[in-house]
Amino acid sequence: MARPGEKSGGSGKKSLKRKAATEEPQEAAVTGDGATENEVQPPKAAAFPPGFSISEIKNKQRRHLMFTRWKQQQRKEKLAAKKKLKKEREALGDKAPPKPVPKTIDNQRVYDETIVDPNDEEVAYDEATDEFASYFNRQTSPKIHNTTSDRPHGRTVRLCEQLSTVIPDSHVYYRRGLALKKIIPQCISRDFTDLIVINEDRKTPNGLILSHLPNGPTAHFKMSSVRLRKEIKRRGKDPTEHVPEIILNNFTTRLGHSIGRMFASLFPHDPQFIGRQVATFHNQRDYIFFRFHRYIFKSEKKVGIQELGPRFTLKLRSLQKGTFDSKYGEYEWVHKPREMDTSRRKFHL
């Protein structure tokens, strides 16, 4: 509070300003190297300590900026090391050491006792007596029955129709509320060799049942990453009626061998190479990727490919003996994640 007779306000501030103006400026202190403090440059920003992590920066924008700079620096260092190694290999010529094989989950796969040896007599005997022997002996020709779950939506119906254009001699029939146990006898009476059922959940295809007729086996797959023809960028023209070639990759175990023979039995024996169409089932880490392509000869040495669609990914859930029977069926193999997926490098197909 101001004393009686004194004015309150900014008189104190004004007197301080006058005092500061009347004071003479002090001489700048001289540093040891002869430069004054005014001439000394401010120190640069300190580098992060060794144990510091970018994730500890609380400001989101600053953290994102520092992470982007760190990634750019990593890419530059990696590219420089790659160029340096390439120059060294060119300088050594034939004396250069062989390139190291990169470590991947696939080439570090845990050894499986059921991996198929092509020269194994037991495997050859099983192939000659299994359910697909009549197809591979050319005694039967494939005839496929395509259907969907009950009351399917448009996306599932279109996938079923497009899949019928990929597999020759396949016919689309709608469920109309029939159970599979009633559909299978009708298919057998009409000489169908395979039954394909596409299931859906929330208007999206999410499962596929493949049953070989008349004696099985029946495989149940989880379906994901479905893309119809209109959803594929830079796709080619619609496929023709030529019989496509079929490629089966990495079905190496006894279980994978059975699944590969099941896929092979869907297509006719003799492909028509003039159509230049290829259906591929590629197994990688127990995920089966389906693609449908057309290859084009650009020159004598270069070949281009066009994806025709559809595309999807399958994951085997179970393999059952005989035709579809969810209640009393005998299962050869069932996927149990908690027991089987204990290692990332262990695969079953």
Image (cartoon, rainbow, N blue to C red):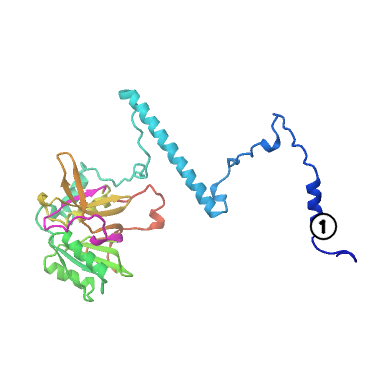
> Dot 1: what SS?
helix
* Circle 1: residue type: Gly
Judged left or right of residue 330, residue 298 is: left
Q: Is residue 215 visible?
A: no
Among the 4 quarters of the image, the one containing residue 317: bottom left
Among the 4 quarters of the image, the one containing residue 51: top right
35 and 115: which is toward the camera = 35
The picture places residue 1, in percent across and down from the top left corner, at 85, 65
34 and 189: which is toward the camera = 34
- Start-end of magenta stretch: 222-250
Image vertical order of residue 219 relative to residue 19, above or below:
below
Is residue 244 covered in magenta?
yes
What residue sits right under mark 1 in the picture?
Answer: 12
Among the 4 quarters of the image, the one containing residue 34: top right
67 and 18: which is toward the camera = 18
Residue lying at the far bottom of the rendered structure: 177
The picture places residue 161, in percent across and down from the top left corner, at 19, 65
